[in-house]
Structure formats: C-alpha cells, structure tokens
Amino acid sequence: MRNPFRSEAEAFGFVLVCVALFAAVALAGILGGGWVALGVFLVLAVAVAIYVKGEPKTEEHPVWARGSTERKRILVVANETVAGRALRSEIVHRARDDAEVLVVCPALTTPLRYWASDEDPGRAAAQERLRASLGALSEEGVEARGEVGDADPIQAIDDALRTFGADEIVISTHPPGRSNWLEKQIIVRARERYGCPITHVVVDLEHEAGQPARAAGGGTA
C-alpha cells in the first residue's frame, strides 16, 4: 500500500501509538478480563482521536519555492500528450524569452498498481515519453529539463512547485471525451489551487498522426 504519512517520523509515531494501545489493552485483559480490556481500549481510542483532531492542520496549498533567478519559470504537466506537436508549439512560444522550463510527466498506472506502489512499468513508459518530448524541444531551441511525477497530476504539480517556483503552469490533455484528467476536473482544480496563470493545451494525438478518432473514454491525460 502507498504510505499515507507525510514523513517517516509521523509514520514511526503512529506505529508507537498503536503498539502502546494494544499493549495497554492486552495488559488490561490479563489483569482484569475482557470487559476491562474493552473499557481501556475505548478510553484510549477516544484519547487518541481527540489528540489527532487537535493536531495543527498543514497548509493546504503547496510550499512555494520561488528562486532568486530573474528568468521566467514555466512548469509543463502532461503524460500521454507530452510529445504532442500542439504542446511543443505552446512551450516554444512561451519560452521564447529564455525561460526556464520544467516538464513533469506523471506516471501512468492502473489504480491497483497505484495503491500497491507498483509503478515501475508506468514510470518507465513516462520516462520514455519524457525523453522524446525533451529531445523534440531541444531541436526547437528550448533547453528544458524533465522529471517523472506522481500518478496524481495535482500531487505531481505540488511536488514540482516545492522546488520549482513556477510563474505559470501549462497542463496538456487529450480532447474532451477522451481525457480522464478533464473528467476529474484537473484544470478547474489547478486554477482554484494555484496562484499563478494556468494554460490548458488540448493535444489530439490521432489528428496529429492523421488517424481517425477513437471512441470516447480511451485516453488518460
């Protein structure tokens, strides 16, 4: 399963609390019987719940790590459409003033593999698409760097913004009807969540390849 904790210290603390809780319940059961053990468990469970509820909430928005550089920073997020010509043209247009460009390609994976943390095939495919995209951008005179991101595009943006304080974000998807990202309102959520301009680029890979469109529901990004 994927780690639900924000840090190893938080996970270790949770393990210690669980061990202490079960040890207390076991000791109560040995000394006082089942009803005493149940009472101890309920009291401790309520105490833990109150403590957790009282913990300070973390900031909902990602940490903004804006660097000291004077160059404009552009964050590009795309997976299957990352090497599309429409997206490449948009990046070239926006990076014409010597901007810094970071291309993030979320790893495409199934829900089962995602929750089982088995993302190697998805990451390998994302890395290959990313390589092709960066190569095409280089041929257009844009020196961009890239990285494979979390399968959740919002989490991938959060992760990138912690070290790359973008002035603007470009998100690429398949056309409506073939894009899971659009179905999940990724563009709307990003515009509500982040304090910089968001540009949505629609890439029709089949049109670019001169192929007939598929039935709705086949795409991902």
Image (cartoon, rainbow, N blue to C red):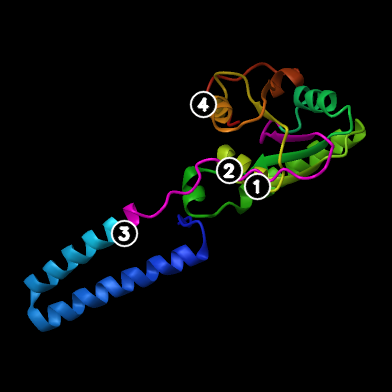
Q: Earlier in the sequence, mark 1 or mark 2?
A: 2
Amino acid at pointer 4: Gln
Task: Give me the residue at 76% from left, 32% from top.
Answer: 83
Crowd around label 2: few <14 · some 14–19 · many ≥20 (10 Å): some
Which residue matches tag 2?
62
Indicate left or right for 22 with 204 as reference.
left
Q: Earlier in the sequence, mark 4 or mark 1?
A: 1
Q: Which element is circle 2 on?
A: loop
Q: Earlier in the sequence, mark 1 or mark 3?
A: 3
Q: Which tag is nearer the camera, tag 4 or tag 2?
A: 2
Residue 169's image quarter?
top right
- Which residues are drawn in magenta? 52-81
Instruction: Identify the disc placed on residue 185.
Output: 4
- Kindly indicate whether the residue at mark 2 contacts the one at mark 1 (C-beta within 8 angstroms): yes
Disc 1 versus disc 3: distance between alpha carbons?
29 Å
Crowd around label 4: few <14 · some 14–19 · many ≥20 (10 Å): few
Instruction: Identify the disc placed on residue 51.
Output: 3
